[in-house]
Image (cartoon, grey):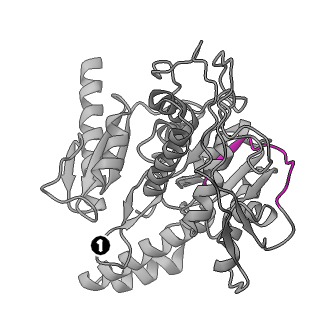
Amino acid sequence: MANDGGASVCFVTNGGGGDSEEAYMKKTTSKIVKAAVEAAKASGLEQLIEETDAAHDPLAWLTGDRMILSYTPMDDDQSMKDQRILLIGDPKEKVKAMAVQYGWTNAVHVSDYCEANPLVDPFGAARAGDPSKEIVVEPTSGHGFGRKGSLSTTGVDVDGDNAAAAAPSSSGPNHGYIGPIVAAPPPKFSQRPRSGSNATEEQPFDTVVVMTDPHDWFEALQAAVDVVCAANPNSEGVLEFDLGRCIPIHFSNPDIFWKAEHPQPRFGQGAFRIAFEGLFRARLSMMKVPPSLVDSVLRECIVQWGKPSQLTRSCCERRLSVNGTVPPSMWMVGDNPGSDMAIAAMGGKRWRGVLVRTGVYEDSDVTCGAEAVVNRVSDAVAYILGVEEREQAEREAEGC
């Protein structure tokens, strides 16, 4: 692809790794150049590549605004600009830099949050190499769950029939809730904190954003469950779970597995979401919250981005639009039926997909509605151009 051929083109990935769109596009361009050079060498056309590069940069049109990372669509959510955000993901400095780029002026990285509230993570100092770290379980007569809380389901969508599928408002839905759910705390832990003591008062978070995979799952999961459950989880004598407050937790990438250097797939952010849901359910179950109510809360608070979500597809359509007009025909080219072809299949008549045999897809897999299966990206481009030219000719013939 020496140019975009006059068509609107964007690249969509469930990755990102904390990079900016510009930085990620540069990495992608380098891969394209490397693949082109290798193909040219194999075909004896290496000199042609060198002459072309000397004349001009054939990939200069590949700029950052054509790259959609897993978290890129979040930048379009204006409501997040002023919210207090618990930011989860690593590398830490990259993720914090992206928060600044997106205008999230009140974002707090989870590691900074736990540093300021050292009792959140009872193993933090031990992992940091503090040999004096001790955790002592105080003797109790039981598990401390004896006090019964009051729960009124008046006006609550217990079965979740009216739960919002998209991001709820930061102020939380009005459930018409009457009585708070109150549960006694688990056995208390005394420890030597890394620095200071746990905060007793803090500004509540409005939302949680899992931008990339966190390196420390324990710390991130503990903090996320705490913050979603209660406005001030580090203060004594407050509700452990407040049904009248529902803040969203955003996950940028739904992929449960990804391919690394290990011979078997590794857990991705989708697995982190599964872990969060399981621990959130366990926490509320311990407080005797009805399972149907837990399901309703999870449906309202979880917001999923990335392929094949509607949120990411809408971002693609905005990027592909010309003068505010969405193209009548859009094509997704990719090697993953479950994300690439699914986003096209869920997009209606405007969207169509072409699968390539360059990665995840194997011939024995379901195609998830792909219109064609080809060997290479260049084959996909040729197929799409052929279809568009034929359909354009048919439309012109009908107009005559």
Of residues 256 and 228, the one drawn nearer to the viewer in this rendering: 228
Residue 202: give x, y in percent of width and height: 85, 48
Q: Is residue 345 above or below residue 43?
A: above
Residue 28: give x, y in percent of width and height: 48, 68
Helix, strand or loop for disc 1? loop
Q: Residues within 10 Å of mark 1 (few under 14, many from 20)?
A: few
Of residues 268 and 177, the one drawn nearer to the viewer in this rendering: 177
The residues colored magenta run 198-211
Of residues 149 and 114, the one drawn nearer to the viewer in this rendering: 149
Residue 210: give x, y in percent of width and height: 59, 53
Of residues 237 and 277, the one drawn nearer to the viewer in this rendering: 237
Residue 338: give x, y in percent of width and height: 31, 48
Query: Which residue is disc 1 drawn over?
Result: 264
Q: Which corner quadrant of the image does residue 391 belong to?
A: top left
**The C terminus lies in quadrant:** top left
Query: Looking at this rendering, what residue extends furthest in the front direction?
Result: 141
**The N terminus lies in quadrant:** bottom left
